[in-house]
Image (tube, rainbow, N blue to C red):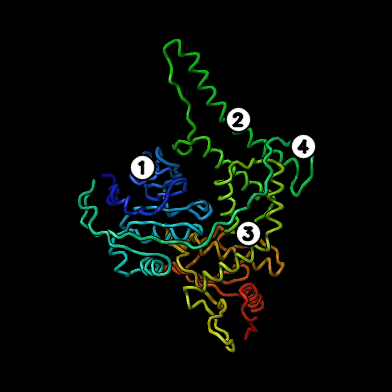
Amino acid sequence: MFNKDFYPTPREVIERMVLGHDLKGKHILEPSAGKGNILDFLNEQGANTMCCEKEPELAKISASKARFLKDDFLNVQPEEVSHLDYIIMNPPFSADEKHIIHAWDIAPKGCTIISLCNWDTIGNSYSSYRRSLKHRIKESGQKENLGDVFSQSERKTGVEIGLITLYKVGSKHSFGDYFDMEEDEFQDGEGLMSYNAVRDVVERYVGSIKLYDDVLENAVKMNQLSGVLGVNSIAFACTQKDKPLIKEEFIKGLQKSSWKWVFHKMNMGKFMTKNLKEELNNFVETQQNVPFTMKNIYKMIDLVFQTHGQRMDRAIIEIFDKLTHHYHENRYNLEGWKTNSHYLVNKKFILNSTTEVGWNGEMKIRYNWGAEQLDDMIKAICYLTGEKYDQSLYVWSHKKPLEWGKWFDYMFFEIKGFKKGTVHCKFKDDKVWELFNRRVAEIKGYPLPEMV
């Protein structure tokens, strides 16, 4: 039925997957929802569910059971799911390692990932994705062989099934209790952004919601008028990309788009780090009761300005840890330090799983953690050096095709991409290299390095 990877999850397997987890009220994503067996169970537990599904017929079924995020889970970005508590999944067994690694990459701190997989995926580490998964289980989770639990299921297979549980340590960052809860505040005033521009975006936001309500109200009026004539049960539906869009989800999407518009209007690209995008998504998803008003727009912009330095320091450390924790070729051990537990980012470092081959064999950049954190690294260095951030200088914002194995300038770096997915990067200026590492040392409390 449908495709070779369609294996609906038996209820007894789902119960075993989530044993010991309290799912009530939790925000949960099912990335390969199929016809929704896992979604049905999660909804019964009182969870707030989201889903992805590539197969069009199955997507229609799963979209009727949960909020539909997008077709292809591998295209989901971290800022879209930064509010999640769990990712619970039965991924396609033909690419289960890629799906689980992607789930880890996009999951926010504090999130738990529970996934089925082909047991051979764990035992036979012949690919870089499988080796990454094996390492991730060792560092952050556990595995269990469930046996051939699909042998008597709706669609049978005798393959041994593994259960992987990964825990992403930490807690979500949020803007906190900072905003004004009053709805009506159209009044003259001044702020960091043009008053007329702020008023315009708020009026468009409020007007869009009013039109949504008007459509529903007209359906009620039509039923009242035509009901006496024997024509009733008329309903108007709001859809997006052929998927139902209830009012709550319409408002969330509208708020996210409106905030993006505000930051674009303010030319605040240098502030839009991976962390800030995730914080904004988490804010809209979990604090929807905060009104989208002129006063709160000014408060948000002011808050972002005030916390920019803290956010840059956090981005610097996250980039440093990501580059150096698992990839020893990215480390630079400075002679003379009393302990080898301290190290720097090497002058030349490698980003994994950042490129892919385009339809015509050209080099394409996968905007995953590698490309995004390199962008964040540039924003952080701009902050440290006082240099102006200019996204138009980025090589992957250029329209001309990128060439494999050729060095390109990328602001503070030279970069070169390879078909196996890696990107080699090197600092162009030793002083910038030293400045970045000295800031890492200051934040982490390392001895301040003297570069040699």
Identify the element where label 1 is drawn.
helix
First reached walking from the N terminus: tag 4 or tag 1? 1
Front of the two marks 3 and 2: 2
First reached walking from the N terminus: tag 4 or tag 3? 4
Q: Is residue 211 left or right of residue 179?
A: left
Residue 134 % position (x, y):
37, 68
Residue 393 % position (x, y):
63, 62
Residue where numbered disc 2 is placed: 210
**Which amino acid, mark 3?**
Ser
| Residue nearest the observer in this picture, 289 or 417 | 289
| Residue nearest the observer in this picture, 12 or 83 | 12
Residue where numbered disc 1 is placed: 40
Residue 74 % position (x, y):
43, 55
Q: Residue placed farthest to the bottom in the image?
A: 336
Mark 2, other Cα within 10 Å: few <14 / some 14–19 / many ≥20: few
**Which amino acid, mark 2?**
Lys
First reached walking from the N terminus: tag 3 or tag 2? 2
Residue where numbered disc 3 is placed: 392
Identify the element where label 3 is drawn.
helix
**Which amino acid, mark 1?**
Asp
Q: Between marks 4 and 3, how big is the CA–CA gap?
A: 37 Å
Mark 3, other Cα within 10 Å: few <14 / some 14–19 / many ≥20: few
Residue where numbered disc 4 is placed: 187
Write the residue at 75% across / 49% down.
192
Front of the two marks 3 and 1: 1
Front of the two marks 4 and 1: 1
